[in-house]
Every structure is written in structure tokens, then in C-alpha cells.
Amino acid sequence: MRLSANGQPVEDIPTLVTLAGLDENRRMQQTIHYFSAVTGEESQNKVLEYESLNHSVLFHDDGAFSLGSMQHGPFAEFGAEFGFVAPNDTGLPGDRRLRLVILFNPEGHLAGFTLIREQRRGTAAAERPDLTVDMLLGTWQGEAVTLYPDWRSSDTYTTTLVLQRQGDHLSQRLTAPNLDVTSTATIVGSQLLFTQGNYPIQVLLLPDGASCTAPLNIPRGQPFFLEVGWLLQENLRQRLIRSYDAQGGWTSLTLVTERKI
């Protein structure tokens, strides 16, 4: 599903993605088939092969990952992809994936999104309901794991996120070691707008329990982040946060796994 910068659906494109190991799994082949939403016929396919991972991607142990721009600069497109794998009842990877791409134009303005909701072929894995504000209200206790693109040791710590609604405003308080941040957003349908900080930030509530957080414009000379969340169960949520420094350089990828208490 392609969406505009304010979250309005633009088009739906059915896809089939096949991942296969080559040379005793020393290489991987990814084949992407695109189909017409009207006729169902294949309209395009793309074949990619990988022998190693480049420095713009990091994977967490459960398969959650982010791939994207390592540096924001003027007059260049900028963006990132975020991916999750839902666990099954045993905690192993299940039959659902969710991926989301956030894109900015060369001027640094938020340009749009691509939401990719996937299920393993031949399974009956169901999608999650569309995300709403009420689903997120409450106190969420989490564990965060931060990875770094320079391959230094990861950091693990606890987080607490409290979300409360008062009319058409949502207040949140996020606490973690050396962090205590409170902010308030205006609720406009499925769009949350945080305008009290150094630059405006938008959160979109999307189909399949997904959410995405991004600045409306890439700020100059200030650190910023991109975030994608997935509500896997009523009381279980994951968030991936890709952080950049004040010079626009990618610094870390954090996975937060949180439960409502």
C-alpha cells in the first residue's frame, strides 16, 4: 500500500516475495513479483541476489531489521525501510511479516510511505486490525536493544511508555536510563501531530496494527529519528527506531519490545 505524506492511501499493489538460498546458503536470491490489483496478472518482477550485508542495514536477533540512508545530505533522496517478523506461540518466527518504507524528497520534505503486509504463502495468518489511539492507551513496560553501525557492543535497557488521552490530545511520557521525556500530540483522525518540540513530528496509525513516526521535514543541525511500530497482540508491541545525529549521520538502531501492564 502506497500512502501520501499525510497517510492517505494512493494505491494497492499485490506482491509475492520469494527468498531462496544459493550455493549452500552462501548467497540469497530474492524474487519480487508485482501484480495488477485490477486483473490479478503479473505486471513486473525483480530479482536480487545478496552475498553479504552492507553497512546500511542492521538485524536484531528476532529478524527485525532496518535498511536505509546512512547520511542525510542536501539535494539527495533520503529514507529507510523497517521490517518485523511476528513470532508464533513458541516464540520462533511465525507466518507474518510487516515492512514499512519512509521516504523524503531531495528537499528534505516527507514524501510518502509504502506499507507492506505479508503472510507466508499457504498459511491462514490473519492481519491485525487497523491501529487506533485507544489501542495504545495505558502503560507499556519494555526492553530496548540498541545496535550500532560500527559494530560496537549492543546496549540493553528497560523503558516505560505511558499514553493518556484527553479529548483530542494524546500525552505521552517516555522514561529510560538518563531519559525522561513528556510530549503532547493533537489527534486528527489517524494522524498525531507533535508540534511542541524543536521541529514538528507526525505519527500515523495504519492498517495491520502498524504505526510510523517521522519529522515533516528533516531538521538541519539537529538530531532526529524515524520509528515504525507494530502491535502484534493487544498487549504486545514492537518499535524500531533509526536514529541520526545533528550532522545527519546514522548512529543506531533500537528495537523496543514492550508489553502493556
Image (cartoon, rainbow, N blue to C red):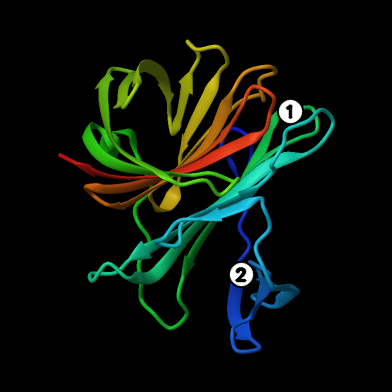
Pointers 2 and 1 in contact (C-beta within 8 Å):
no
Q: Position of residue 248 (x, y in %)?
A: 68, 29
Residue sitting nearer the eye, 98 or 93: 93
> Which amino acid is tagged 1?
Gly
The C terminus, quarter of image? top left
Q: Position of residue 232 (x, y in %)?
A: 32, 54
Picture quadrant where residue 78 is located: top right
> Which amino acid is tagged 2?
Thr
Residue at mark 1: 108
Residue shown at the point (43%, 30%) measured from the top left:
189
Residue at mark 2: 15
Residue shown at the point (61%, 58%) measured from the top left:
12
Q: Position of residue 123 (x, y in %)?
A: 39, 79
Decide if residue 65 is on the left or right side of residue 49: left
The N terminus, quarter of image? bottom right
Residue sitting nearer the eye, 170 or 39: 170
Q: Which SS class for mark 1?
A: loop
Q: Residues within 10 Å of mark 1 (few under 14, many from 20)?
A: many
Q: How many marks?
A: 2
